[in-house]
Image (spheres, helix red, strand yellow):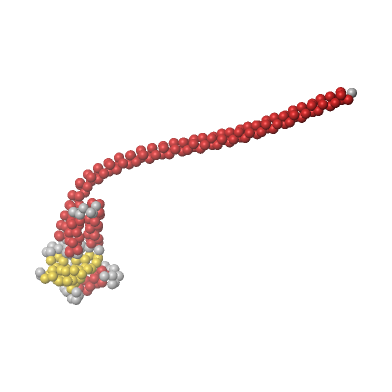
Amino acid sequence: MYLYTLIASIGLLTMVQVNGASLNQSESVEKSILSASQQSQKTISSSADLTIEHQNEIKSLQESISQLSVYQKHLNALLASQESELASLDSQLNELGETKQSVVPLMYKMLEQLDTYIENDLPLHKATRTERVNKLKALMVRADIADAEKYRRIMEAYQIELDYVSKLSTYLGPITVNNIEKQAEILHLGHLSIIARSLDKQTYWVWNNTNKQWENRIENTQQLDHAYSVANQQVPPALLALPLSIAEVTQ
């Protein structure tokens, strides 16, 4: 009986040890499975994150490609516009070359006509006007001055001539009377009347454009003095009675 009990106890102990070993092994296997599962989850999560990252990169690249496509279309349109502009500029340059061939002779003709006009005109600012034309003639052969600037200055000279036609003004200048040059105060009302007064305000001359000479004036000197006062802005403007320097034109 004792022996049977001992054998049973040994068998029970052995069974307990075997079951304990199996339990430990099961726990170890479970831990391994859990660890592998966690590692797999990490791998899956990492792969998912990488997939999302790649998807974002692909989306970003697609947007960049779309923007580059739009920009390329813009550049193509810009290039086409520039090519059209270049063609237009080439055409304008050709036209400009043809225009310059006609403008330069025109400027010389304008200067010639201006010179002749001043020579035959009243003796009004004669030296200043002649000097202006001579400077323009010298300007025409200067390579450092553009043709457009030359043309502008010629037109400016013509504008000055137009101003002389409508002005009432005075200036100091020389006159020649009986082949003797005198300094005088010259008054002109446009191109209608030009009068000279001696610096001592005692003698008056009126230019006769028909005879091309200065003629002494002794009557109505008070009216002439009043005209000088008006021209010098010493008195208010008033109706003036001045002798004509040019012959009256009859219809």
Residue 105 position within the rendered picture, expressed as x and y whole percent measured from the top left: 18, 49
Horizontal side, residue 91 vs residue 15: left or right: left
Quadrant containing the N terminus in the rendered view: top right
Q: Residue at x 17, y 61 (%)?
A: 130
Could you tell me if residue 248 is visible in this image?
no
Q: Residue 46 lies in what quarter of the image?
A: top right
Image point (54%, 37%), residue name:
56
> In which quadrant will I find the C terminus?
bottom left
Q: Residue furthest right?
A: 1
Q: Residue at image x 65%, y 32%?
A: 36
Left of 70 or right of it: where is 194?
A: left
For the residue pair 117 and 13, the one nearer the viewer reads as: 13
Residue 183, image quadrant: bottom left
The answer to whether residue 13 of the structure is visible from this angle is yes
Where in the figure is residue 202, as x and y percent of width and height?
A: 18, 76
Query: How many numbered marks have been drawn onto this rendered protein structure?
Result: 0
Q: Position of residue 17 (x, y in %)?
A: 78, 29
Who is closer to the viewer here, 160 or 130? 130
Q: Is residue 43 above or below residue 162?
A: above
Write the residue at 63% across / 33% down.
Answer: 39
| Residue placed furthest toward the front | 3
Q: Nearer the viewer, residue 249 or 79?
A: 79
| Residue 204 at x, y percent in the picture | 17, 72
Q: Is residue 171 above or below residue 82?
A: below
Q: Residue furthest left?
A: 179
Q: Is residue 227 above or below residue 31?
A: below
Which quadrant holds residue 118?
Answer: bottom left
Q: Nearer the viewer, residue 175 or 101?
A: 101
